[in-house]
Amino acid sequence: MVPQRKAYDEAVLVFELARRRRPTAEIARELGVSVELVNKIAAGQRRPHLQRDIRKARRTLDNRLRALVRRKALAAFRRHMRIIRTGSSRAAGRSREYILSRTISHEGNA
C-alpha cells in the first residue's frame, strides 16, 4: 500500500521558501506538514520539481525589491537636489555630502 501524501498548498510553500523570512518550523506548522519535509523540500531532497518554482519566485521577489529600491533612491536623490537648489547653505551642504557619499561609495556597483 502506497502512503498517502499530505495535502498542502504548494504555492504557499514555494512562496514562503522563496521569501526566506520565516523559520521552516513555522511554515510547516501553517501547512500542517512536518518540519523535516519542509527542510528536505528546501534542500531539493524531496519534491525536486519545486526547486525550479522556488528559484523563479525568488528571482521575481528580488526583481521587485530592486525596482522598489531604485524608485526610493531616485526619490531621495530628487529631494536632496531640491534642497541643494532651494535650501539654506547648511542644508544644501549636507545634501551635497549625502549625494557624494552615495555616488562615490556605489560607483563600482552601477
Image (cartoon, rainbow, N blue to C red):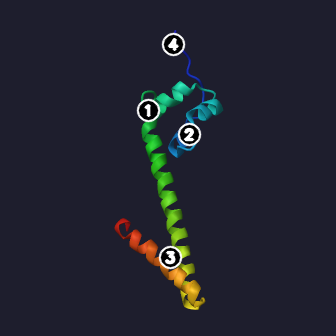
Work out how far the residue at label 3 is from the one at label 4, CA to CA, in angstroms: 64 Å
Which of the two residues, 32 or 77, is positioned nearer the viewer here?
77
Q: Residue at x 56, y 44 (%)?
A: 21
Which of the two residues, 32 or 25, is positioned nearer the viewer here?
25
Q: Residue at x 50, y 63 (%)?
A: 67
Q: Earlier in the sequence, mark 3 or mark 1?
A: 1
The label number, if any, that marks residue 11 in the structure image: 2
Query: In which quadrant is the C terminus drawn?
Result: bottom left
Q: Secondary structure at mark 3?
A: helix
Percent across and percent down for residue 53 are 46, 41
Q: Earlier in the sequence, mark 2 or mark 4?
A: 4
Q: Is residue 75 above or below residue 39?
A: below
Percent across and percent down for residue 94 are 54, 80
Q: Residues within 10 Å of mark 3 (few under 14, many from 20)?
A: some
**Would you name the residue on which mark 1 appears?**
43
**Would you name the residue on which mark 4 appears?**
2
The label number, if any, that marks residue 98 in the structure image: 3
The amino acid sitting under disc 1 is Ala
- Residue located farthest toward the front when viewing the structure as drawn: 90
Q: Earlier in the sequence, mark 4 or mark 1?
A: 4
Q: Earlier in the sequence, mark 2 or mark 1?
A: 2
